[in-house]
Image (cartoon, rainbow, N blue to C red):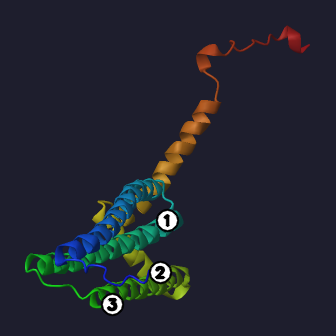
Amino acid sequence: MFGFGKPEKTPREQAKEAKRGISQSQRELEREKLALERQEKLLIADIKRAAKEGNNGGTKILAKQLIQLRQQKDKMTMMKSNLGSIGLQTTTMAATNKQMDMNRFQQVIMDFEKQSEMMGMREEMLDDTLIDAFDDEEVEAEGDAVVDQVLTEIGLDLASLMADAPTRQANAAATRFDNLLPDAALLPPPTKISAQSLH
């Protein structure tokens, strides 16, 4: 009833059990990373569209979101790498037929979770700092520099886009105005007014 006499797990069994949990965590991280990559592609498309439309404010907000998303993706990559290192240790122990100290292994997992939690806290602090930087008028120039850097990475030049924006907007307005005008060919001929009709 109390588990006395229960055979102790072999190193191979211990390693298999540990690797199962690690592999599951790695798959979850990979799924989250792929989802972030899909979001990144959509966000880059939105940034290009906002920049080409001359929406400077919207471009900055989207660029900030792209920075945060990439930081999150980097964090996922680091966590997956750390899990891989732990998995390699368990495989090595099993290969050398070395009995795993489950208490020590559990401590390693707890340390990893603690590290991940601290990393998440640092991420939130960094996000808050970045948001404040974009909202603070005193560091507006710094925010522009960040946007320029992001747009350069995705192949856009903010300065030229903003310079061309008024022309594009004017052309669009002219097109809308022209569409409102009736076709001259469909207009009736002008009515001729005779001198007699004026008397």
Residue 171 showing in the rendered view: yes
Give the vertical position of 54 relative to 9 (above or below). above
Q: Residue at x 10, y 80 (%)?
A: 97
Give the vertical position of 166 relative to 18 (above or below). above
Q: Check disc 1 and report its element: helix, strand or loop.
A: helix
Mark drawn on residue 56 = 1
Disc with the residue nearer the chain's start (1 vs 2) = 1
Q: Spatial distance from mark 1 to mark 2, Cα to Cα?
A: 21 Å
Q: Spatial distance from mark 1 to mark 3, Cα to Cα?
A: 49 Å
Crowding at mark 1 (Cα within 10 Å: few <14, some 14-19, many 20+): some
Q: Check disc 3 and report its element: helix, strand or loop.
A: helix
Q: Check disc 2 and report its element: helix, strand or loop.
A: helix
Q: Nearer the viewer, mark 2 or mark 3?
A: 3
Mark drawn on residue 107 = 3
Q: Residue at x 59, y 15 (%)?
A: 185
145 or 88: which is nearer to us? 88
Q: Residue furthest right?
A: 199
Q: Residue type at mark 2? A: Asp
Mark drawn on residue 24 = none
In what quadrant of the picture does the C terminus appear?
Answer: top right
Percent across and percent down for residue 51 are 44, 59
Percent across and percent down for residue 32 are 39, 63
Residue hosting label 2: 127
